[in-house]
Amino acid sequence: MSREGRRRLAGSIVRFAVAVIVILGVLVGIWQVTHELRENPRSATAVAAVPLGPPRFETDGFLGADPGWLVRTLALPRTASLIGLDLDELRGRLLAHSQVRTAVLTKIFPSTLRVRITERMPVARVMAQMANGEPQAFLVARDGVVFPGIGYEMALLNSLPWLEPMKLARTANGFQPIEGMGAASDLIAKAQLEAEHLYAAWRVVSLARLNADAEIEVRTASGGTIVFSATTDYFTQLANLDLTLDRIAAQGATFKRINLANGRDVTVTLDTPLLPKTSVIGKSAPSPKAVAMPVGSKPSSPHTTAFGNFSTQPKKAP
């Protein structure tokens, strides 16, 4: 073995020995503390006599905005000591609040309890009727859990669309998780990330047809309805929607319904005519009903108020 090889071998042995010594030292220290507490009750009594200080609270969400939330939720007695706390019971109290996703509690002797939680983030709002008959708004997380929402600013809440779930069932402590929320959350997240200018106009996301037709309906601020397929790539559907809205705007029309769930073709029902209505002297021409046209067809008259199933693929250059 060369001199450099012997040097590396010796260094490895030294590092291994140091690691073993450190581990043994920690184990011996733990044993000594445990032995001392068992053999000398006075030490345990002294630790128990130290009054519990204010908890050290850490969160990745908004519950920290309410300074009294943690105190109310833990409900610790005034005479509590750190050594006497049941961490499993306290963790259960935290997780009983539906806004809390995970909770980790740690004792830091002699008198500090550290509480670290992660919170559910809302993707939509839902309106529920309470036992007294009054409606109340709740927040819905990505996993479908419904929670009241504490610490959120009104601007953030107003940016969330309303949700029409398939059903909203009560439990003893709140509501059952909403079915189909995973598909709706994926659509909302993709729209926020890839098409924020389109998402800004979304007001209601309906799951009423999700089980029957695998479709999600979105109602916009203008009153129009957009139908998405829950089994097709959302990015493609959003791109088709953006192109469709540009074409509608270019023709000076507004839409009543856009169906993106038909594959490559988009069906559009217009709410206003493509061109101004003509009129007879003293009379206005009647407004035709909006009817979606079949694939490849063209408006039969300049006043047809619907067109449909045009391809969203870009034209090839000659």
Image (cartoon, rainbow, N blue to C red):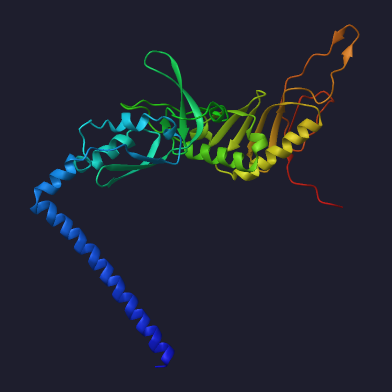
Q: Say which quarter of the image contains residue 168.
A: top left
317 up-or-down from 239: above or below:
below
81 up-or-down from 208: above or below:
below
Q: Position of residue 38 (x, y in %)?
A: 10, 52
Q: Position of residue 12 (x, y in %)?
A: 36, 79
Left or right of 283 in this view: 241: left
Nearest the camera: 241 or 290?
Answer: 241
Which residue is pictured at 89% across the width and 11% down the height? 280
Q: Say which quarter of the image contains residue 33.
A: bottom left
Nearest the camera: 193 or 314?
Answer: 193
Q: Say which quarter of the image contains residue 31.
A: bottom left
Q: Position of residue 222 (x, y in %)?
A: 67, 24
Query: Which quarter of the image is occupied by the N terminus?
Result: bottom left
Residue 309 in sight in this render: no
Residue 131 in sight in this render: yes
Q: Position of residue 243 (x, y in %)?
A: 73, 39
Which residue is pictured at 32% across the width and 27% down the height? 173
Residue that extends furthest to the bottom in the rendered view of this protein: 1
Left or right of 88 in this view: 190: right
Which residue is pictured at 59% across the width and 45% down the height? 233
Which residue is pictured at 64% across the width and 41% down the height? 237
